[in-house]
Amino acid sequence: MLVATCLGLAALAATSCSKEALPDKPVLTGSTPGAAGTGSTGSTPNATATSGTVPGVIPNPGGTTPGTAASILTAGCPERTALRVKTNSGDKTLGGGTSWADVTLDSSAQILLTSFEAPSSQAGSIAVPSLTGSQLSLSLYLTATQGGKLRTGDYLSVGANPNAPLQLNSITLYSSAGREIVAGFSKPDQKVTITQLDDKVVCGTVDTNEATGSFVAKRV
């Protein structure tokens, strides 16, 4: 903002002016320089800050709909879900959609990872999803046994590790062609590793024959 003070007659060809520059208002830490975030004003008028500019903050781990959640992720969490899955028509990439985690009594979790926008109500549903085109939907079912609670760590295949305190019970993949895989695991090296579990998100990695990669899912 400039304040100009002019001395002399307006009719004179040469006018003596002095200009004083007022300091810009500060930009909040983590916002784009010259951009305005909520409740703040940057140095560029009418500019809007881009969400997600603060390192480690994911505005919407559940999907691409703005404002669905905000959570500070730990170092072991990815910023988005990205998996490679095996289908009857070849390997496919699953990501870019919504990721939900439906936790029951802190002892079991149904994790839904999709390549499209899916409502949170589908996370705990056993109904077969109706998919079109290249849409993919992957469901993981995890449990804590022996009266334990879900926590970070390795969830091992229940078939090969029936006494494991943390178990991977099943993995199911659907495409527009129908159910691609449903697995009750038997190999000891099949696992899901949970790296963060709190009241906002569940995230980790998948390492099975049917799917590999990492995910971040919003708690339902």
Image: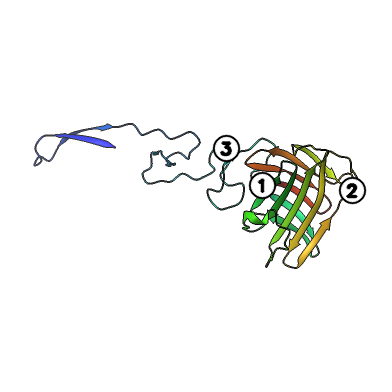
Residue that mark 3 sits on: 55
Asked whether 84 or 219 is in front, the reply is 219
Q: Which residue is mark 2?
A: 159
- Helix, strand, or loop for circle 2? loop
Q: Judge by depth and name the residue closer to the eye, 147 or 217.
A: 147
Q: Disc 1 residue type?
A: Ala
Mark in the foreground, 3 or 1 = 1
Question: Does the image show residue 200?
Answer: yes
Q: Please indicate whether residue 132 sits to the left or right of residue 186 in the image.
A: left
Q: Nearer the viewer, mark 3 or mark 2?
A: 2
What residue lies at 78% left-to-right and 52% top-to-bottom? 211
Report the colour scheme: rainbow
Depth check: give the residue in front, 68 or 145. Answer: 145
| Residue at 36%, 44% in the rendered image | 45
| Local SS, label 1 | strand
Q: Disc 3 or 1, which lies upstream in sequence?
A: 3
Q: In the picture, which quadrant includes the N terminus?
A: top left
Badge 3 element = loop
Residue type pointed to by label 3: Pro
Mark 3 or mark 2, earlier in chain:
3
Q: CA distance from mark 3 to mark 1?
A: 18 Å
Residue at point 58% right, 52% down? 64
Measure the C-alpha gap from mark 1 to mark 2: 25 Å
Looking at the rendered structure, the kind of residue marked 2 is Gly
- CA gap, disc 3 to disc 2? 40 Å
The label shown at residue 217 is 1
Q: Give the residue drawn at x 78%, y 56%.
A: 172
